[in-house]
Structure formats: structure tokens, C-alpha cells
Image (spheres, rainbow, N blue to C red):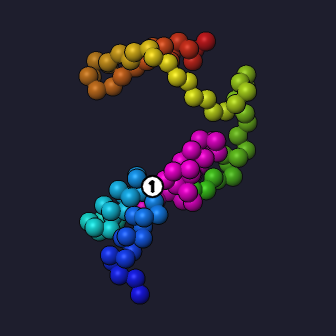
Amino acid sequence: MWTYKYLKAKLIHQQSTSEKMFCTMQIENRIPYARLKVQHRMRPQIADLLRLSIYKDLEDHANVEERENIVGVRSNLYFITHKEREDSMRDGKSKVSWFDVWTTKK
């Protein structure tokens, strides 16, 4: 029979940092939670990034598999790195990167 301490140690040993924090919070504080099992919005390429870390058992709904590729680009997933600064919005909390806006608009 598994004890609480054994279960906690086993979970913490096998998981990533974010999973460890989540499990510790959930187990120690007995916080109820729900977890997404089937996603309906993200392209599979984006969902794959989550499956590599925190959502190993995340499934794609058939409707995301049927989406057409984005016209005019070679891939449906891009990472763009730049050193342009972000500007603060009027609310003082949000940021905007005009470089991203103009690059995407082109």
C-alpha cells in the first residue's frame, strides 16, 4: 500500500519542475483541480510543445488535424528572436512590440 509520503516522493522524483510544483501544491494543500484531456484549438505542432513538458497525455481533437496549412509560409510554427524593445500600453500592465506588429503585417 502506498503511503502519502511515498506517493509524494515518487511523484516529485519523476516529474519536471513545473509538475513538481503543481503536485506539491495539489497533494499538500489538497487542492482540487481539473486538467484538459482533449484540446480543440491549437495546431498539433503547438500542442507538441506542451506535450514535451507538462501535458504528456494531451490529445488533439480530430478538428485540429483537419486544418489547412497557413498559405504562403513553409511551416505552421515559427520562433522569431529579436532584441527590439517593447512599449508599455496606457494601462501600465500590458506591453506591445511594434516590431512584431510590423514584421507580421508585412
* Image coords of residue 49 (percent x, y): 57, 44
Task: Tell me the residue that label 1 is attached to.
Answer: 16
Which quadrant is the N terminus positioned in? bottom left
* Image coords of residue 54 (percent x, y): 49, 53
Q: Secondary structure at mark 1?
A: loop
In this view, the residue in front, 54 or 60, is: 54
Left or right of 23 in this view: 47: right
96 over 75 or under it: above or below: above
| Residue at point 56%, 14% (across, down) | 103
Residue found farthest to the bottom: 1
Q: Which residues are magenta?
A: 33-57
Left or right of 4 in this view: 81: right
95 over 77 or under it: above or below: above
Say what amino acid the circle numbered 1 marks.
Ser
Label the magenta part by its dominant secondary structure: loop
Left or right of 38 in this view: 27: left
In this view, the residue in front, 77 or 36, is: 77
| Residue at point 51%, 51% (across, down) | 53
